């Protein structure tokens, strides 16, 4: 006599075969929206999750039968496909007030820079050939000239980001040798990027001098020996040491390096450039060091980001003495780190705008410079637009915006924001539904409310934000 199946075996038998599942009308509709292979992959993952629940005793035959009858398998498959189709680099609305928001791509570029990047991406372009002679040249010759004009340095080059710039720096001047750095400047930035680890990867020996809060020029001088290849100063961009402190200046390191025949460098991090036509951001950012001052210090090379306070696309820029930049360019690692044509086109246009006295037009710089008085009318407009939607309690509040990306730690820029409390559900649930919108909206959740800061809204974002709220409320 056959043994009756256990409840677990009965549950497994209820699960549909893949062919049967994909023939169902709701699955066929999904295959019309996406490749069949993708739908099959997602269906297999969902079925595997249900099998795991059956094995663990979390799902019995009766519950499974009820779920299948209610169409829950297809509902979950539809949700998986929606998540999959919404992955990757897609446009988003930044209503968090964090201007250089790393998770959201940091600085949005100027429309003219974006157009230059689009043209470079979709077409052939003049990259490594001289259009006048037809001879091969270097892809960043023009970039070097722009950097020279912008900073006063003798030459410059660009790589994919500032971490790459620092890696190239150590590899060129300290590989198999030592690099001297203050203990108070051994920073870690986002993604567990640590200066000592970069030095190790570049084959350099770390020589720490001074203490966490006090490092004098004499500390550097006494540590120099025949193996020293680099003296480096690192801007502590994402933290501050205050109180009983002392540090060697870039000018002092430059002078010491010249006297002892050792290359000197300054990793500036965010790269705040102040010049004609650009808003004065330094007073707002708590004494962030200036790029022009770093170059004037006389160090052999300065490294900084192109996509933070400079306001361009992601890049790591190195400017300094002509011989120093030439040595960096000759390093085989430079080829692995160099800029592609799209980033190069956007960066060139950004530097042209700065040199033309149009720095105030760069979106990130304009956002950072916006005053609370300028932002209040925008917050009031946002409040009025949302007041037409039901189920929201709205309040205009005085708040602070963060510069972001490790720039100006502890600084809050005065702003006006809209505090939103939903009539139903939590603020966290509302924020999650806003992120799930066709154009995702990112906010701050604070004191069980969603906070919307107009500082970081770009043209057209108000309408996108209201649409996202409308959809979020409809699905609540």
Image: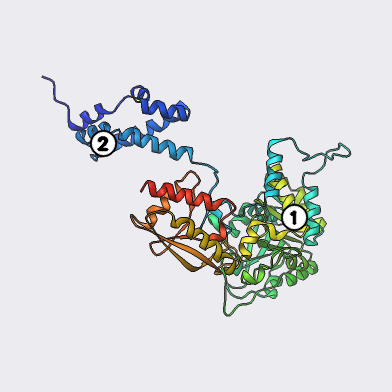
Give the residue drawn at x 48%, y 60%: 383
Residue identifier under label 1:
353
Q: Which mark is residue 55?
A: 2
Residue 57: image location, x then y, percent: 23, 39
From mark 2 to mark 1, how far is it between C-alphas? Answer: 62 Å
Q: Is residue 387 above or below residue 40?
A: below
Give the residue drawn at x 48%, y 59%: 384
Viewed as shown, does residue 21 lie left or right of 469?
left
Q: Nearer the viewer, residue 463 or 1?
A: 463
Q: Nearer the viewer, residue 455 or 402?
A: 455
Residue 309: image location, x then y, percent: 65, 60
Residue 133: image location, x then y, percent: 89, 38
Q: Is residue 418 visible?
A: yes
Helix, strand or loop for disc 1: helix
Q: Which mark is residue 42?
A: none
Residue 299: image location, x then y, percent: 76, 65
């Amino acid at each position: 006599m056959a043994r009756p199946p256990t409840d677990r075996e009965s549950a497994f038998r209820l699960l549909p075969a893949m062919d049967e599942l994909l023939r169902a009308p709701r699955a066929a509709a999904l295959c019309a929206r996406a490749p069949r292979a993708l739908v099959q992959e997602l269906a297999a993952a969902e079925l595997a999750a249900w099998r795991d629940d059956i094995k663990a005793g979390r799902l019995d035959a009766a519950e499974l039968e009820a779920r299948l009858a209610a169409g829950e398998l297809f509902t979950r498959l539809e949700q998986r496909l929606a998540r999959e189709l919404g992955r990757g680099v897609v446009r988003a609305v930044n209503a968090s007030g964090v201007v250089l928001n790393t998770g959201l791509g940091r600085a949005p570029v100027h429309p003219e820079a974006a157009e230059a990047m689009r043209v470079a991406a979709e077409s052939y372009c003049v990259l490594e050939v001289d259009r006048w002679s037809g001879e091969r040249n270097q892809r960043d010759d023009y970039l070097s000239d722009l950097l020279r004009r912008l900073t006063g340095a003798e030459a410059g080059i660009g790589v994919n980001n500032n971490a790459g710039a620092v890696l190239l720096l150590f590899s060129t001047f300290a590989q198999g040798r030592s690099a001297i750095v203050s203990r108070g400047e051994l920073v870690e930035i986002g993604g567990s990027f640590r200066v000592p680890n970069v030095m190790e990867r570049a084959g350099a020996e770390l020589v720490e001098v001074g203490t966490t809060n006090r490092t004098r020029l004499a500390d550097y001088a006494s540590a120099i020996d025949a193996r020293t290849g680099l003296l480096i100063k690192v801007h502590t961009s994402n933290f501050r040491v205050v109180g009983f402190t002392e540090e060697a200046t870039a000018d002092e390191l430059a002078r010491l390096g010249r006297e002892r025949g050792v290359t000197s460098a300054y990793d500036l991090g965010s790269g705040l450039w102040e010049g004609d036509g650009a808003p004065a951001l330094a007073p707002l950012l708590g004494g962030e060091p200036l790029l022009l001052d770093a170059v004037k210090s006389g160090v052999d090379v300065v490294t900084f980001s192109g996509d933070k306070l400079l306001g361009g696309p992601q890049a790591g820029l190195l400017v300094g003495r002509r011989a120093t930049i030439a040595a960096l360019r000759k390093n085989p690692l430079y080829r692995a780190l160099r800029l592609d044509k799209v980033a190069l086109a956007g960066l060139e246009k950004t530097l042209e705008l700065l040199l033309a006295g149009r720095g105030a037009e760069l979106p990130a710089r304009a956002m950072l410079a916006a005053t609370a008085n300028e932002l209040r009318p925008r917050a009031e407009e946002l409040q009025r637009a949302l007041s037409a939607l039901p189920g929201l309690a709205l309040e205009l509040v005085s708040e602070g915006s963060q510069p972001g990306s490790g720039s100006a730690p502890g600084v809050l820029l005065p702003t006006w924001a809209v505090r939103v409390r939903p009539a139903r559900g939590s603020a966290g649930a509302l924020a999650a539904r806003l992120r799930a919108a066709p154009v995702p909206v990112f906010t701050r959740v604070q004191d069980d409310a969603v906070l919307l800061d107009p500082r970081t809204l770009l043209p057209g974002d108000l309408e996108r934000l209201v649409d996202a709220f409308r959809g979020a409320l409809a699905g609540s």
